[in-house]
Amino acid sequence: MSEHVTSDDSDLPAPAESLPGARGVRTRKPPIRLIYVPGLGDRMPPLVHLQREALRSWRALGVRTTMFRVRWSSDASFQERLDRLDALVEQFEERGERVALMGASAGAGAVLAEYARRRSIVAVVIIAGKFLEPDDIIKPVLERNAPFAQSLSTVPKLLEELGPADRARILSLRSARDGVVDDEDTLLEGAVNETMRVVGHVIAIGYALMFRARRVVRFLREVATD
């Protein structure tokens, strides 16, 4: 089962270059690779297509993007899919890229769990995240998306391992009123929490991908240079 890559993965980091007239060799900063994990809608081709197209525009901002689908409605366990995500992160790190993660809705739990596992990740962004309180989700949804149910019981414990410095590298974007996820659940203590001037869960995700790209990229660059 392969994950779709939204940018040209054949672009390896460029080697250090000697500039005419320079006293030494200037080494380019390693590129940033943003791995995006969508929510429960990752089983719906139209929604996946729209998110993928939105991510393509991020290349112009100097960020390479890759989409990783957990496939929340599959028979795989959350741990199995987390292992696949970890392998993808390692692949890009071995190529010399700085890896950041971004998760929307249920995808927030996956990126937070991976961040708790691998602290070499430079930054994490969550959009309208649902990673707490499984009791708020109706039983049929949890039964149909077993990895999601498992993430809701796993992630809160992993968050306890993230100290103030770790949490400062997390940007949480939320709508003014979500309507699907309890508004307080989209807040993460110690993270950079920002409210967007939109209403609605799906609208918040689309708005962030289309109109908050520059803000996210600025955050990635700021924390990546700390």
Image: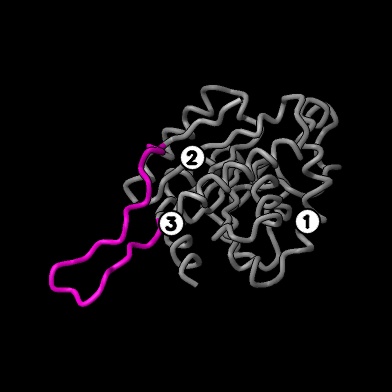
Q: Which is more toward the observer, 112 or 197?
A: 112
Q: Nearer the viewer, mark 1 or mark 3?
A: 1
Q: Secondary structure at mark 3?
A: helix
Where residue 224 sits: x, y (%)? Answer: 48, 65
Asked if 37 appears above or below 31 in the picture, the reply is above
> What residue is shown with label 1?
158
- Give the mark nearest the N terminus, 2 or 1: 2
What is the quadrant of residue 44 in the picture?
top right
Q: Residue furthest left?
A: 21
What is the quadrant of residue 163 in the picture?
bottom right
Q: Which residues are magenta?
A: 7-30
158 magenta-colored: no
User: Which mark, by number, is residue 66?
Assistant: 2
Q: Which is more toward the observer, 22 or 51?
A: 22
CA separation in Å, label 1 and label 3 = 26 Å
Give the residue displayed 82% in from the left and 42% down from the top: 136
Amino acid type, callout 1: Leu
What is the quadrant of residue 55 in the picture?
top left
CA separation in Å, label 2 and label 3 = 15 Å
- Give the mark nearest the N terminus, 2 or 3: 2
Amino acid type, callout 2: Thr
- Image mark count: 3
Q: Secondary structure at mark 1?
A: helix
> What residue is shown with label 3?
217
Where residue 59 sits: x, y (%)? Answer: 36, 45
Q: Is residue 103 left or right of residue 153?
A: left
Give the residue displayed 25% in from the left and 61% down from the top: 17
Q: Secondary structure at mark 2?
A: strand
- Give the mark nearest the N terminus, 1 or 3: 1
